[in-house]
Each structure stands twice: as structure tokens, then as C-alpha cells.
Image (cartoon, helix red, strand yellow):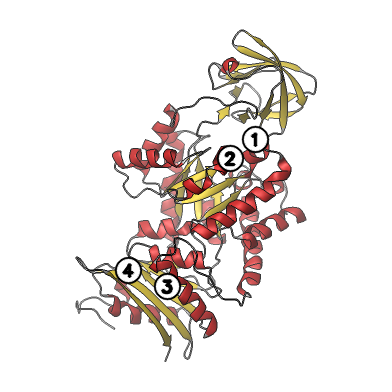
Amino acid sequence: MTSGNPKRTHDSLFSPFKFEKNPRACRIICTIGPSSQSPAILEKMLLSGMNVARLNFSHGSQESHGTIVHEIRKTAQRLMKPIAILQDLQGHKVRVGSIQHSPSLCLNEDQEILLGHGETVSNKRIGIDYQGITDYVAPGQHIFLDDGSIELEVLSTRGDDLHCRVKLGGELSSRKGVIFPDSHLSFPLLNEKDENDAHFGVFLNVDMVAMSFVRSATEIIEMRLRLAAWGKRDSFIVAKIEDRKGIDNLDEILHVADAVLIARGDLGVTLPREKVPGIQKTIIQKTNAFGVPVITATQMLESMIYHDKPTRAEVNDVYSAVMGGSDAVMLSGETASGRYPLHAVREMDRICREAEKELRSFKGEIPVRGRRDMHDKMAASAVNLARNTKARCILAFSLSGATLKALSTARSNVPVYGVVVEERVLRQLLLHWGHSLITMPHEEKLEDLIGPVLKQLQEQGIVRTNDRIVVMASEAEPGAKETYLFKLYLLK
């Protein structure tokens, strides 16, 4: 089919992106660092299944992150593969300072050591980036370093320092996190570093921003207002749930956040470890029901930092996270600093695909989930129609991305191919379950696009003659109500 403009050809209608023939539904987020920031490794990770590149602003300089963003985008453009960039702000997490002249420092059990504000770490004193710590922490309380791998007990205060004994020893590296599970420290909404980094993220035009230790909806709202004031009016904010207060206020957070990240490392330190699996399950169930994408993160393939194969327990962990309803799974040290970043991405891809085979075997009726608006009702109907008619796939057209978000929530058991107008929307959808996406020109009429898109699917070998395809779309003419299209096509 052609549009009203006779000069446009079938090939000129679309962005250079192509549909994936065998798309994976669960997204893979990879943290970029020294092990993965070279163009050659970035290219292989993109080809191996990376959907979102995470930049951890707890480490590195703005200059180094800017260079990485440039390399990621240049590589993605060359490969004609879309990728989203997630800026992960440090947040109000307290961190130790830098260890001088050595990559790490060994803290031995029963060793006594001071802890207080400072920039360096030695075997006599641990400097942290928090002033006035003695106002909030008392003798008898505990302190955890590096996601709980090292535990200190506070014996007394000495001036502005805490006098501690090492209860659980280990190797401490520079800039590792410090958690005070028995205390409630005072923090501003955004510290100076986060404010500078978030402003820099607007300059870089990152696709998503992750906020650490989110405890209320107010924090998300305030962050969105600040981003808008800096010129970012299409912000996508990921709320990291890391402590009891974030869990308790999850319902209000889900009303304003664009996605939720289950930060299991800090959850396992601020709360008893044995409670984390149940908390993970509850958070996933709530986010799925509300239609908000959820990321399961921390130590998913941790052993692959040093080994080229995961443990059986890690494989089971990833598989269970996908089966449980995760929209995305995240690699941290495995790809940032590990020896085998490519192996880790490929293992994650294989495990996700295996779990998705089982999910696709579900034969029951799909209920309406999410906010239960018209988009959600249409999406549930489309998924059920595709299942009942044995359709090859669902093809969805979406101006704002709302239709595709609803389809993600509905969890189709057939592939979903989506067409959106803006690459910005496309990249933000890369955190949602289950789409292969391309872009289309806004000026084209919807009915003039269906034929060319079906032709592209056919040319790529995704659909064949006599295949059934469910087509759904929503569009709004200026000054008119939104209209919905819902059809079952038999390809001739």
C-alpha cells in the first residue's frame, strides 16, 4: 500500500531497524565498565542480547561515562540495533573512600578499626562520605560493608569516629557501599553529586534514570520536576527498592514510577536474607498487576565474574525470576568488571529463552491487568484472540507506546512486533517485556502502514502465506477522541 505521498517507497517508510526474527521477551540489562566498554566488546554484547546499557554513576567520572555513551550509540547505529541507556545515580548510599597503593584491603575478624568521615581507607581507619555519623549510630549497632560481605560492630565513639570491631572479615575495595541497618541517617532528596550527575544525564539524553533507595512517591515526583526544569520532559524514572520503607510504600511508588528495580543486595543487608525471596515475589506480583515493568537485579550470575560458567543455583535463580514475572534481569559486576562479560550475556540469554518456552505453553484466559483502561482491555483481548486462533504473532501500532506497554503487561504467548513513531519511545520500551520494534513516520495514515509492515514481516521470513496475524492500534486525530483498531488478518 502507498500513502498520500507518492514519492515515498516501502523501504523509506521505516527506520533502519529490522524486526528480530526470534525475539526474546525478557530484557537483559548489562552494566558497562572496564571489562565491557571497548567498541569490540560492546558490539558483541549487543549482538548477544543486551537491550539496556547501565551506567553506574557510583563509579567513574562524567567524562568517562560520556565517552561510553558515545561508543554505545555509535556501535548501535552501525549494527542498526536499538539500545537504551540507563543512568543509575549513586543516591544517598554511603560509600567508603579510596584505598591507596593497593586494589583492596584485608579486614580480619576481631580487628579493631575506626570509621568516620574521610576520603581514604587504611588498616587503621575507614573513611566514608558521610559527616556526623556519630549523631546517628550508637554502640552495639552493626555496620555492613560491600553488600554485607564484611560486618562491623560499634564498640564506642571517639570524637567524630566510630570505634568498631570486625565481626565478619573480608577483602574491602575502594568505593564499596556502607549500610547502617539499625540507624536512620538523614539525607537530602538529591545530594550534590546526584544533582550534578542527573543534570549531566539530561545533557547526554539518557533514556532512563534510576534512583537509589526510593522510599516514597514524593521522591519520584520531585525528581521528575527537576528533570523537566532542566529540559527533560519525557523522563523515564526507575525506582530502586532497597529497604523496608520502600517495600511498605510500594503501592504509592507504583503510581508514579515508570519501572521498579529489586535491589536484592541492599535488601539482603537491610533485612534478613531469608526474607528476600518472598519480598522479590511480592514486588513482582504487585508490579505485574499494576502494569509497571520490574527488574530483578544483583548477583544473578555472580560467579561468572571469575568463571566462564554459572553455578546451577544461579541458572535456577535467573530462570525463576523470568518465570515469576520479571520484565528484565540485570548483570552488574559480571559485565562491568568480570573476566567473562560476553559469556555472562550469552548465558543470560539462553536461560531467559528456556524459561520463556514454558511461559508460552500457558493455555488459560489472560485477565485484564495494569491500570485496566482501554489499552489494557484491548491488549488482553488481542492476546486471547491470538491464542484462540493460533495466530503467528501480534502486530501493534502505537503513537505513544501505551498500546505496547499494555501488551507487555498482558504477556502474550506469541511474538509481538511493534511500530512506534519516535526512537525515544522505542528505546524506553526496551525495558518492557516482549516486543521487537521499529519506527514509522508520523505523517503516514495508519491504514497505509499495515500493508508495508506485513510485507516487511513476510520478507524477513517472520510470517508466511496463510498465517493469521492479530493487528491492533490506537490513534488520535487532533481534537478527536482516541480510536482503536483491532483486526485478524489471514496473510495471502
In the rendered image, the vertical position of residue 427 relative to residue 9, given as above or below: above
Q: Residues within 10 Å of mark 3 (few under 14, many from 20)?
A: many
Mark with earlier residue (2, 4) = 2
**Residue under numbered circle 4:** 440
Q: Residue at the spot x=56%, y=76% of the render?
A: 365
**Residue under numbered circle 2:** 242
Cβ atoms under marks 2 and 4 closer than 8 Å = no
Cβ atoms under marks 1 and 2 closer than 8 Å = yes
Rendering coords of residue 163 (x, y %): 69, 14
Separation of marks 1 and 4 at Cα, in angstroms: 46 Å
For numbered disc 4, what is the local secondary structure?
loop
**Residue under numbered circle 1:** 270
Rendering coords of residue 71 (x, y %): 44, 48
**Residue under numbered circle 3:** 378
The one of 476 and 399 positioned closer to us in this rendering: 476
Q: Residues within 10 Å of mark 2 (few under 14, many from 20)?
A: many
Q: Amino acid at mark 4?
A: Met
Cβ atoms under marks 2 and 3 closer than 8 Å = no
Mark with earlier residue (2, 3) = 2
Mark with earlier residue (1, 3) = 1
Separation of marks 2 and 3 at Cα, in angstroms: 34 Å
Task: Inspect this view and state whether residue 411 appears.
Answer: yes
Rendering coords of residue 210 (x, y %): 48, 43
Q: Amino acid at mark 1?
A: Thr
Mark with earlier residue (1, 2) = 2
Separation of marks 1 and 3 at Cα, in angstroms: 41 Å
For numbered disc 2, what is the local secondary structure?
loop
Separation of marks 1 and 2 at Cα, in angstroms: 8 Å
Q: Residue at the spot x=42%, y=27% of the render?
A: 192
Separation of marks 4 and 3 at Cα, in angstroms: 22 Å
In the rendered image, the vertical position of residue 470 relative to residue 296, given as above or below: below
Mark with earlier residue (1, 4) = 1
